[in-house]
Amino acid sequence: MLTPFDKELLNIIQTRLPLESRPYAKVAQWLEVEESTVLERLNWLKDNGYIRRFGAFFDSACLGYVSTLAAVKVRPEQVAAVAQAVNAYSGVTHNYERESEYNLWFTLLTADQAEQNRVLAAIRSLPGVEGLLSLPAIEKYKVSVEFSL
């Protein structure tokens, strides 16, 4: 269960994490605790599934990367195994199950189109996969998401 401290910490790190050599020390100063307390709580939050990924956003297209949203039709009994296999690719940033014919969706970011094609082909050949749609963005819209706790 999240504590009031955890909620305040998560609110800060979502949008106000400072860019400096010891950002967690600064956060600790704001929260009036030791830096080790901030680090321990962040580790606990990650270990207990409250934080999945922690990192910066960058404009991948400006850096030459290619991305796609993929929709996969997976036999229901294979969804968990396919999701686990999809998550093993470092370029997968989101992976979620949906209630539809195409029941597993993920985003994939790769260094070039050839790598994207290789990854999608490998996923397409996984046991239980009956179809895969690659839906690259024609136009991008970035929405800033912040969860107020």
Image (spheres, rainbow, N blue to C red):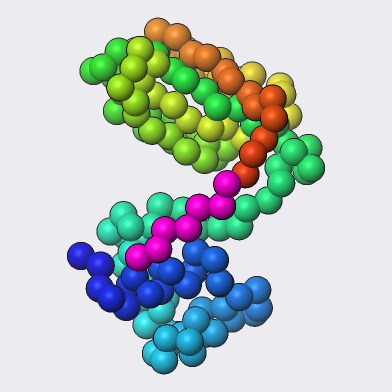
Residue in the foreground of this view, choosing between 46 and 88: 46
| Apparent side of residue 64 relative to residue 17 in the rendered image (left or right) | right
Residue in the foreground of this view, choosing between 138 and 125: 138
Residue in the foreground of this view, choosing between 149 and 136: 149
Displayed quadrant of residue 149:
bottom left
Q: Please provide percent x and percent y for residue 93.
A: 52, 40
Displayed quadrant of residue 129:
top left
Q: Please provide percent x and percent y for residue 140.
A: 67, 35
Which residue is pictured at 48% across the width and 87% down the height?
Answer: 30
Residue 54 against residue 96 in the figure, above or below: below
Q: Please provide percent x and percent y for residue 61.
A: 74, 38
Q: Main secondary structure of the magenta part?
A: loop
Which residue is pictured at 61% across the width and 75% down the height?
Answer: 18
| Apparent side of residue 39 relative to residue 45 in the rendered image (left or right) | right
Outermost residue toward the top?
130
For the image shown, how many numbered marks are present on the structure? 0
Check if residue 144 falls in the magenta segment: yes
Which residue is pictured at 54% across the width and 85% down the height?
Answer: 26
Residue 66 against residue 31 in the figure, above or below: above
Residue 9 against residue 71 in the figure, above or below: below
Q: Please provide percent x and percent y for residue 110.
A: 65, 33
In the image, the segment drawn in magenta is: 143-149
